Image (cartoon, helix red, strand yellow):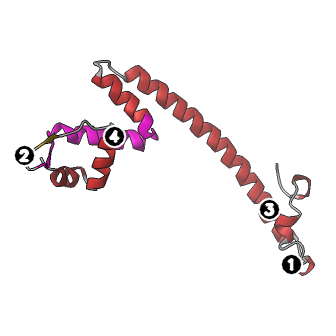
């Protein structure tokens, strides 16, 4: 298969396929006598794996470690579980951070409903935010 055929079948731009090759996620394809890339049909399953792994939140570097293990003949399942466990821990931490931001935003919105715009000075720009130190923000912290 030529790169255009692979790109069409995988629903990816040809540039993405070339990028994956440069990053070492895909082996360099054979070259025809005219210099065109010639791919095995197996590249489609590799591209599907890469896209699925990205969908699970793995970085290209993390995906490369999985592919490297597989190319060495090692079944990467334990490594993948470890990566996914780390990833979900990162998601939980981010959720906690977002919950804190949510509370802060709710407090600012509540504060904005209580403040009179007529009392906002040019020096403050907007007194909803300007004087929004934690002890001045209404709502739960």
Pinpoint residue 35: horizontal percent, then vertical percent. 13, 48
Which element is circle 4 on?
Answer: helix
Pinpoint residue 44: horizontal percent, then vertical percent. 21, 42
Residue at x-position 36% and y-position 22%: 76
Residue at x-position 30% and y-position 24%: 70
Circles 2 and 4 in contact, beta carbons < 8 Å: no
Q: Please give the residue where the numbered disc 2 appears in the rendered image.
A: 33
Q: Quadrant of residue 97?
A: top right
* Mark earlier in primary sequence (3, 1): 3
Task: In the rendered view, tell whether residue 27 sits above or below residue 71.
Answer: below
Residue 60 left/right relative to 11 = right
Q: Please give the residue where the numbered disc 4 appears in the rendered image.
A: 50
Circles 1 and 4 in contact, beta carbons < 8 Å: no
Q: CA distance from mark 3 to mark 2?
A: 66 Å
Label 4: few (<14), some (14–19) or many (≥20) C-alpha neighbours in 10 Å: many
The label nearer to you, 1 versus 4, is 4
Residue extent of the magenta highlight = 35-61
Task: In the rendered view, tell whether residue 43 sits above or below residue 125.
Answer: above
Q: CA distance from mark 1 to mark 4?
A: 52 Å
Q: Please give the residue where the numbered disc 1 appears in the rendered image.
A: 117
* Mark earlier in primary sequence (4, 3): 4
Give yes or no for residue 37 being in the magenta stretch.
yes
Q: Choose between 98 and 15: the one closer to the eye.
A: 15
Which element is circle 1 on?
Answer: helix
Circles 4 and 3 in contact, beta carbons < 8 Å: no
Pinpoint residue 40: horizontal percent, then vertical percent. 14, 39
Q: Please give the residue where the numbered disc 3 appears in the rendered image.
A: 108
Pinpoint residue 23: horizontal percent, then vertical percent. 36, 40
The label nearer to you, 2 versus 4, is 2
Which element is circle 3 on?
Answer: helix
């Amino acid at each position: 298969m030529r790169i255009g055929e692979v790109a069409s079948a995988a629903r990816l731009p040809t540039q993405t396929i070339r990028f994956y090759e440069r990053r070492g996620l895909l082996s360099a394809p054979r070259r025809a006598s005219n210099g065109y890339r010639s791919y095995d049909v197996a590249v489609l399953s590799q591209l599907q794996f890469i896209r699925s792994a990205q969908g699970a939140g793995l970085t290209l570097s993390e995906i490369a470690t999985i592919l490297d293990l597989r190319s060495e003949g090692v079944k990467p399942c334990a490594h993948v579980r470890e990566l996914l466990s780390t990833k979900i821990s990162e998601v939980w931490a981010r959720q906690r951070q977002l919950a804190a931001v949510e509370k802060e935003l709710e407090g600012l919105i509540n504060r904005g409903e209580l403040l009179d715009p007529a009392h906002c000075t040019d020096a403050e720009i907007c007194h909803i935010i300007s004087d929004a130190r934690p002890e001045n923000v209404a709502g739960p912290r």
